[in-house]
Amino acid sequence: MKRRALTYSLISATACLLLVAGLLTWWNTNFLGPDTFCDGALARSDVEAALEGKGRVTESASPDPSSYALRCEVARSSRFIDSPQPEFKVAFDPLSGAAVFQSRVWQSRGGMSLAREGLPAGATDRRAWLLLPSSCWKKIPARSAAIPFVTTELKEGSARPQALLRITQLAAQRVMERAGCPETPASPEAAVDAAPAPEKKKETDPQRVCGIPGFTLPKEVLLPGSVELGTERTTSAKGKARLCELHLRGKNHPGVTLSISDNKDVVAAVQKEDPAITLGETEILTCSDGELYVGLWANDSYKDAFLDNAAKGRSPRSDVFDDLVTTLATSQAEARGWQGCGS
């Protein structure tokens, strides 16, 4: 009897251990999990790369297979182990044309990795965006002045920008195929490989602001004693767009972000924007060689500095911003050797 009882105890203990091991495997790995997510748009390897850590990957919101509209949420969760539990949402997202260059949502733009192949796109360690081509816009109904983007947002933790960018490019491919767009994005592998990391933050050279030869700030941009030159961070000059963050010295860290692009879809998106809801300053320079978008977005601290100095008879803030955008646009056209320019 004792031997039989011992045997039953061992069997029971072994079964319990196997059950616990099985549950831990199920909770903390992707054993027997799905191979694709978001209606087949994303492979498991791509999702796992974007959701760093250990745990099981599950889809909490799925897109309608019959629609081009995409909204998908995927999370990594674990139990009884110390690991991040991140979640991302990738979605078809109609935005204003310059939103990714000027909206508060997309701050830290100088830290973006911008694609220099394929469609205009960029990513930080928390967010990614992709502008669908103008050939697609009529295929996808949207509210007036809204432009179709695909965006990815990481809700917890951080990830490699290239991993979030790849998720966004794969999702965009699905949107374009469902919408019947006449063109498809370039290979996500090639586009991700061609999204270099931004430059490191460095002191601003007053004769070469944002690393642009000959570009100097109009004197009204700085306020002696309140706002002075500081450091800057720029994206690669080889991207579909170029972004430069000026971290100025002053109360509450005043800052300005400048954006530049001669990509035809970026220019067309900004031109479609409703001036009444424009978030920052924009200018489209039309030259015989092409069109150039230049934009400016200033943070609240920088704007407040101008309000504090309003009583001192300085130039109105709007005039200063217009002058800065025009100076940048002119310097960029000259650097490209473009002729016959006018806004």
Image (cartoon, helix red, strand yellow):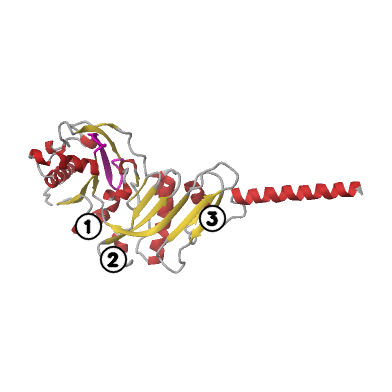
Q: Where is mark 3, residue-wise?
A: 58
Q: To which residue does mark 2 refer?
A: 143
Q: Amino acid at mark 1?
A: Ile
Q: Nearer the viewer, mark 1 or mark 2?
A: 1
Q: Report x, y in % for residue 73.
A: 46, 56
Question: Tag 1, which secondary structure?
Answer: helix
Secondary structure of the residue carrying tag 2 is loop
Contact? badges 1 and 2 (CB < 8 Å): no
Start-end of magenta stretch: 235-254
Amino acid under disc 2: Arg
Q: What residue is at 54 percent from the left and 50 percent from the top?
A: 77
Mark closer to the chain start, 1 or 2: 2
Residue linked to disc 1 = 277
Residue type marked 3: Thr
Tell which tag, 3 or 1, sits nearer the viewer.
1
Furthest residue in direction right, as rendered: 1
**Mark 2 or 3, nearer chain start:** 3
Name the one closer to the observer, 153 or 199.
153
